[in-house]
Image (spheres, rainbow, N blue to C red):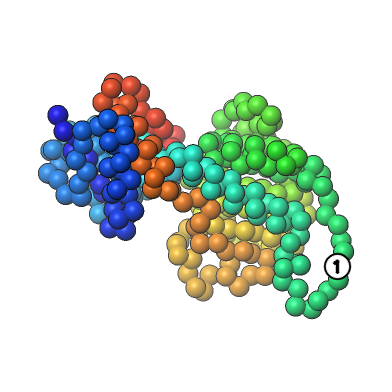
Amino acid sequence: MTLTILFAASEANWHSYAAPLQSAMSEAGLDATLTRDAAPQDVDYIIYAPTSPLQDFSPYSRCKAVLSLWAGVERIVTNPTLTQPLCRMVDPALSEGMMEWVVGHSLRHHLGMDRHIVNPGRVWDPACPPLARERPVAMLGMGALGTACARALAALNFPVTGWSRSPKSIDGIPCLHGDAGLAQALSTAQIVVTLLPKTAETENILNARTLALLPLGAVILNPGRGALIDDGALLAALDAGRIGHATLDVFRTEPLPLDHPYWSHPRVTVTPHIAADTRAPSASRVIAENIRRAEAGEPLLHRVDRQRGY
């Protein structure tokens, strides 16, 4: 029987994904029709982006799974009409892109590159940075992305401490959890990377109280979720000189409004949500494999736990 797979995402996404998805499904041995328009009762799987007009899943009674193109699922996981299994995007290429962004900006701040790259006064400043092994890093979030970034930084000799809400055990990376663990991880971190999902427990995890735990001059890198940071508290800490710099890739409102103080703050770098983008060829193989697994009666990969929200 030919499967009907509904592509519920933007037209731009369709142009990027149509050919790679068809190729990936063929390679996976799937007899499938990929379409942007199908009667709900005929749809076997939905490939989905939360920006899609499709917000009511109740008519899709035959649908076996909703396969997200995004790693973050906070914009769909609470939808009361979604009763089908939901799978988030976990793509090795996405992890590679995130790792490169995190390592690049960690090295940028560690080595003090900005003062040489932007030096209109032609100041001769031969100050030598410490070695990486003398620059502790706290990785908040030890999922697939956080673990990849933690290992990459550890390979460069940064002492990395991981933190997550629940206990984790990862070879080569000491991991902490809970409130006491968070305080311990932050107390020595000269670089903090936030790669947590957005949940009720993680929103504003970097706030006035937790930012005050950091050593003077610490750097914040946020490629995770905009809501992980209390913006007002961060701006106050930057203005007071407690936080040395914040490099931010994600925001509560995107694109970041032109009048937002982050744009003009001398200690803030704004990047336009580019830390880890989904690549159509590799993401298509992830989706095709999950459909193949479902059709073979195997467990779905990266299935979202509705209670935890990710």
From where the camera sits, is residue 299 visible?
A: yes
Task: Give the x, y percent position of residue 133.
Answer: 79, 42
Instruction: Residue at 22%, 40% (x, y): give it.
Output: 5
Instruction: Residue at 69%, 60% (x, y): give it.
Output: 245
> Looking at the image, which is closer to me, 305 or 149?
149
Q: Secondary structure at mark 1?
A: loop
Instruction: Count residues near mark 1 (Cα–Cα under 10 Å), then give few for <14, some for 14-19, many for 20+.
Output: few
* Image position of 205 (left or right of 15): right
Displayed quadrant of residue 297 = top left
> As displayed, is residue 10 above or below residue 149?
below
* Image position of 83 (left or right of 96): left
Instruction: Residue at 43%, 48% (x, y): give it.
Output: 278
Residue at far bottom of view? 121
Task: Give the x, y percent position of residue 16.
Answer: 34, 53
Displayed quadrant of residue 262 = bottom right
Q: How many marks?
A: 1
Q: Quadrant of the C terminus?
A: top left
From where the camera sits, is residue 306 visible?
A: no
Residue holding disc 1: 125
Q: Amino acid at mark 1?
A: Asp
Task: Give the x, y percent position of residue 4.
Answer: 18, 38
